[in-house]
Image: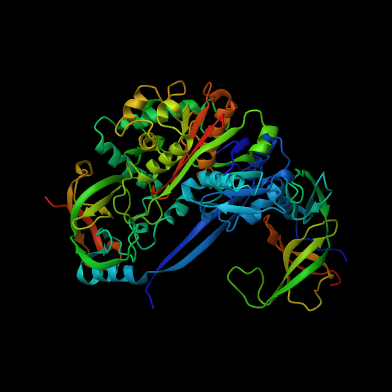
């Protein structure tokens, strides 16, 4: 068994969001709305939004409200916890197509057998919002 | 290998902090500019090669999955190249091989760095072996200070003043370059009295910290003849690496730089670089490095770089302009820098360098260095095949 | 069913996302560094390794020669004295520095070695340090098996 030498550090970041993603987080923080971007060439509505269309490369500047509900496209159950996990394990990872959008948003839900592909879910907001994706604490079934 | 040309180039407006764009948007800015300059649509690009410094700088691992979509890479091969300071240059060379091989006709090469999103010093400190010299944490300025001291000590005719002259020259050139981050002239007195960082390196001897990207569209000969009236042909290139902690390393006259240049000159049939080249864009992250590279690249003999800059030969109107763009001293997004040197050299021979155009430029050299000064690469562009 | 939206928050438009990444690594030393640092700590010896092909003596020790790629062979005790190849006076702060700047950092060619040894220079006026100056290690009393088992190098005269 070889010796090791420990190196520990903490590096700080401040990731520039750009206007589009900045507007997405501002809207989420200020009024709980979700925005998608619209591609002027192929019409694809992307949520989360971007200032460019990933499919055809065109610039996308129009933002449009999507949701508030979305359809679960796929689910993965995270069985074990890990440092920095968004929820206590076990919890669910979801890819959600928000109403009006053509792409999917990655988020989480509490462990719940009812949440399967096709389930309609809505956001449960965090008590304090600061302009990050965790301003939505998690998604829950619409029927609740 | 078949001929390859640059048919379009693009750069961002480099700045200390491009708060207005995310990293993918910044990369897209340069890529879009290059494709527009080339007159091609994203769908026509066959493959994308992207390069940057270590991922720790931007704090996103495997960034190609995030950046690729900003350049419409869906359905195409994408490869990311990382070779430290030479990343941009190696990216261009890798893209050259993609086209020269015959497998691809149009390739987009893009180099980028968004240093302001992260902590550059923390990133730099991790470049060193954690069991060895990371304990001394000298950073890039420390390494450059060692290099400058060894170089100045060896050559009686070269002084700290000559390093200062490099800054004055490049800063003046930067005022002519609309993409440059730093566009303010300085005097020699200001450079010499700026505060010490790692002696003999002073604050104004150092390149700034930058956000920026540069891109070029590389084309096969067949496509180039249709797309561009005056493409920039790749006529020579060389890449050379040395080991770290190796015997016989000479950071004041690096063998990898000498050999990379020799490989490039041989390929380009250049026998007398100072007369047969019309300009050189070299990666001078620190002022003294421009003097060291001039010698190692054979633009003058060892020990003569002081006289070379004094004579005005490396000024924009001189016989062998060096860094007419202002060089890294005017914009230093590390992973992009090598590609910016290639873009600048290519645009010069294409006659598209605007206010910092060297009149009649036909052959231009681009250089980059990296690591503990053990990576060097050289690319030569010509207006004629 | 109506959504309960928590009290609206406001503020200036979001332009950046702040965060941090914590790194913890345990770097494996490997047998070469292990022996090298054991010798520093236990015996106050700096060890190099000789190349079986071209004969250069390398530090840090390693299994293959960085010059000719032949395997390395015998371990060689180096002197803890040598000459300064180059140096710089570091003023800028940098994560992980051994001492508060300013300090003089140098590449030292120890007698017997063919690769430089990085370290700091002490007990001399910074203005008096020169390329070629002969220096000798000042060993630390409390040694842990790192390069700091030597506090600094000081002029021999």
Q: Is residue A6 above or below residue A47?
A: below
Decide if residue B160 is in sight here. yes
Q: For residue A78, what is the image quadrant?
A: bottom right
Residue A81 % position (x, y): 62, 75
Residue drawn at (60%, 68%) of the image: A84
Q: For residue C31, what is the image quadrant?
A: bottom left
Residue drawn at (46%, 20%) of the image: B317
Q: Quadrant of the N terminus of chain A?
A: bottom left
Residue B195 % position (x, y): 36, 37
Residue drawn at (47%, 66%) of the image: C24
> Which residue reaches farthest right?
C1
Q: Is residue B182 left or right of residue A35?
A: left
Q: For residue B187, what is the image quadrant?
A: top left
Residue C99 % position (x, y): 31, 55
Residue C85 % position (x, y): 24, 47
Q: Work out whether residue B225 or residue B343 is closer to the camera in this orientation and state it.
A: B225
Q: Quadrant of the C terminus of chain A?
A: bottom right
Decide if residue B186 is in sight here. no
């Amino acid at each position: 068994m070889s010796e090791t030498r420990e190196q520990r550090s903490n590096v700080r970041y401040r990731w520039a969001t750009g206007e589009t993603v900045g507007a997405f987080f501002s809207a989420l923080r200020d009024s709980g709305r979700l925005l998608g971007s619209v591609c002027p060439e192929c019409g694809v509505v992307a949520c989360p939004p971007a200032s460019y269309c990933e499919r055809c490369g065109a610039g996308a500047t129009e933002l449009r409200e999507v949701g508030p509900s979305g359809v679960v496209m796929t689910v993965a159950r995270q069985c074990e916890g890990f440092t920095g996990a968004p929820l206590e394990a076990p919890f669910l990872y979801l890819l959600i197509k928000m109403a009006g959008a053509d792409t999917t948003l990655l988020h989480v839900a509490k462990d719940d057998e009812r949440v399967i592909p096709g389930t309609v879910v809505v956001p449960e907001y965090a008590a304090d919002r600061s302009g990050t994706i965790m301003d939505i604490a998690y998604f829950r079934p619409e029927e609740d | 290998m078949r001929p390859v040309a640059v048919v379009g180039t693009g750069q961002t407006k480099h700045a200390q902090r491009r708060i207005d764009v995310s990293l993918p948007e910044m990369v897209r800015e340069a890529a879009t500019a290059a494709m527009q300059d080339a007159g091609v649509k994203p769908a026509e690009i066959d493959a994308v090669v992207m390069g940057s410094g270590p991922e720790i700088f931007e704090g996103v691992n495997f960034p190609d999955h995030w950046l690729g979509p900003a350049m419409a890479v869906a359905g195409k091969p994408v490869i990311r190249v990382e070779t430290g300071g030479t990343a941009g240059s190696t990216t261009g060379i890798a893209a050259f091989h993609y086209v020269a091989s015959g497998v691809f006709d149009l390739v987009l090469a893009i180099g980028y760095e968004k240093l302001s999103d992260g902590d550059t010093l923390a990133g730099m400190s991790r470049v060193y072996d954690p069991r060895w010299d990371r304990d001394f944490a000298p950073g890039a300025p420390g390494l450059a200070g060692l290099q400058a001291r060894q170089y100045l000590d060896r050559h009686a005719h070269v002084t700290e003043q000559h390093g200062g002259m490099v800054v004055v020259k490049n800063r003046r050139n930067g005022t002519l370059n609309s993409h440059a981050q730093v566009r303010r002239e300085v005097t020699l007195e200001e450079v010499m009295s700026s505060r010490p960082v790692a002696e003999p390196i002073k604050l104004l001897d150092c390149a700034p910290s930058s956000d920026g990207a540069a891109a070029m569209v590389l084309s096969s000969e067949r496509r180039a003849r249709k797309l561009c009236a005056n493409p920039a042909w790749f006529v020579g290139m060389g890449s050379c690496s040395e080991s770290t902690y190796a015997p016989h390393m000479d950071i004041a006259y690096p063998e990898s730089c000498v050999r990379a240049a020799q490989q490039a000159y041989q390929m380009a049939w250049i026998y007398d670089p100072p007369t047969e080249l019309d300009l050189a864009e070299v990666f001078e992250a620190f002022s003294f490095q421009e003097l060291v590279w001039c010698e190692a690249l054979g633009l003058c003999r060892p020990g003569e770089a002081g006289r070379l800059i004094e004579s005005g030969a490396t000024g924009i109107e001189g016989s062998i302009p060096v860094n007419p763009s202002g060089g890294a001293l005017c914009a230093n997004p590390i992973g992009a820098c090598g590609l910016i040197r290639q873009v600048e050299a290519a645009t010069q021979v294409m006659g598209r360098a605007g206010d910092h155009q060297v009149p009649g430029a036909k052959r231009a050299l681009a250089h980059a260095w990296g690591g503990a000064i053990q990576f060097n690469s050289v690319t030569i562009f010509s207006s004629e095949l | 069913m109506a959504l309960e939206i928590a009290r609206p928050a406001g503020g200036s438009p979001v332009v950046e996302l702040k965060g941090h990444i914590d790194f913890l690594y345990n770097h494996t030393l490997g047998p070469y560094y292990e022996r090298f640092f054991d010798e520093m700590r236990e015996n106050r010896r700096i060890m190099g390794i000789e190349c079986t092909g071209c004969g250069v003596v390398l530090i840090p020790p390693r299994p293959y020669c960085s010059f000719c790629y032949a395997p390395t062979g015998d371990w060689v005790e180096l002197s803890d004295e040598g000459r300064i190849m180059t140096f710089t006076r570091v003023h800028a702060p940098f994560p992980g520095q051994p001492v508060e700047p300013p300090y003089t950092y140098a590449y030292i060619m120890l007698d017997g070695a063919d690769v430089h040894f990085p370290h700091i220079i002490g007990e001399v006026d910074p203005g008096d340090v020169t390329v070629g100056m002969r220096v000798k290690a000042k060993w630390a009393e409390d040694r842990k098996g790192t390069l700091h088992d030597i506090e600094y190098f000081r002029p021999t005269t």
